[in-house]
Amino acid sequence: MSARMLIIVDVQNDFCEGGALGVEGGAEVSARIAEHVRRAGDQYDRILASGDWHRGDTGNGGHFAMPPTEPDFAVTWPVHCVADTPGAAFHPEMEALAAELGERLEVVHKGHGNPGYSALEGIVVATGESVQDLIAGGEWERIDVVGLAYDFCVRATALDASDASTDTQVRVLRPLTAAVHPDGVGQLERELVAGGVSVVDG
């Protein structure tokens, strides 16, 4: 039987306003995602929520710009989402949703010692499952991808999901994302479509 999955990418405090790498509109996106899940969550067989879980004692494979080097905000970034810190915690809207859903919301950790843009590089914390294997080995009718940031981790997750499961409809729900570089969204969406990903407003 085919199934549907929702991947909520990196809706963490450090990626929302006031965080170490805040994306404008991040908090609003968090609220909209929570509303979407409360309204339409029953259509998904599995709901994954990924989070960066970086090491604090390393540059994480060149991902962090370690002082005195300045980040370029394309390949290198300020220190963010260090494991077990408030910045790595989900935004309060997501925390409330997680409390409501309990075990139905499956937390995924990624990027422990490496950049870890795509949720498919992560592991489901409760089960130890590889997200890559979970998607590649499943009979998925549709995978919806939402979260932060549209032009980095959402992009990587959607493209990887499309590559891993070629018979699956992979969609990005545009209103449930926010980009680091909004001016580049047009080119981003052309890339997604070329990679087999649908971009929808629903």
Image: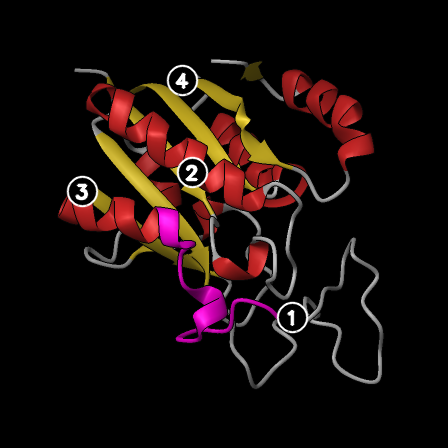
Label for residue 31? 2
Which of the 4 image quadrants contains residue 34? top left
Mark 4 secondary-structure assignment: loop
Mark 2 vs 1: CB contact within 8 A = no
> Is residue 106 depicted above or below 184 in this figure?
below
Q: CA distance from mark 4 to mark 1?
A: 31 Å
Which of the marked residues, 2 or 1, is nearer the chain's N terminus? 2
59 sits left or right of 31 in the view: right
Read off the residue under disc 1: 61
Read off the residue under disc 3: 101
2 or 81, nearer to the observer: 81
Q: Which residues are magenta?
A: 80-93
Say what amino acid the circle numbered 3 marks: Leu
Which of the marked residues, 4 or 2, is nearer the chain's N terminus? 2
Q: CA distance from mark 3 to mark 2?
A: 15 Å
Mark 1 nearby-residue class (10 Å; few <14, some 14–19, many ≥20):
few
**Callout in the foreground (4, 2):** 2
Q: Tell me where residue 141 appears, x and y as whole percent.
A: 32, 15
141 is within the stretch colored magenta: no
Q: Tell me where residue 158 appears, x and y as whole percent.
A: 53, 31
Read off the residue under disc 4: 168
